[in-house]
């Protein structure tokens, strides 16, 4: 999971909302909205990135 928006370079922690395409290009919610939720790199749909837990607890 990438830690920053590819467009504006905003820091995206694992807990932050972010959007990714099928190639895992990563964008913040503001940039994804500005781009109409379409990846400028591949033309794919930008979807909400799954969030990870902050801790690494065993399941």
Image (cartoon, rainbow, N blue to C red):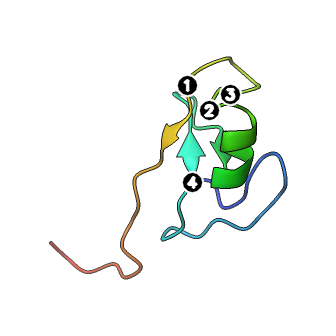
Q: Position of residue 36 (x, y in %)?
A: 67, 30
Q: Which residue is mark 4?
A: 18
Cα distance, mark 1 to mark 2? 6 Å
Image marks 1 and 3: residues in contact by CB distance under 8 Å: yes
Q: Is residue 28 visible?
A: no
Residue holding disc 3:
39
Q: Image quadrant of residue 41?
A: top right
What quarter of the picture does the C terminus occupy?
bottom left
| Percent of width and height locating residue 2 | 63, 54
**Mark 3–mark 4 distance (CA, rounded to whole Å):** 13 Å
Q: Which residue is mark 1?
A: 45
Whether residue 46 is situated above or below residue 6 in the rendered picture: above
- Whether residue 2 is visible here, answered yes or no, is yes
Secondary structure under badge 1?
A: loop
Q: Which residue is mark 2?
A: 37
Q: Marks 4/1: CA distance?
A: 13 Å
Is 23 placed above or below 28 here? above
């Amino acid at each position: 999971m990438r830690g920053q928006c590819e467009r504006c370079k905003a820091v995206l922690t694992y807990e932050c909302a972010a959007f990714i395409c099928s190639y895992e290009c990563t964008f913040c919610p503001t940039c994804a909205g500005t781009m109409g939720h379409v990846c400028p790199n591949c033309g794919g749909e930008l979807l909400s990135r799954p969030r990870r837990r902050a801790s690494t607890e065993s399941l």
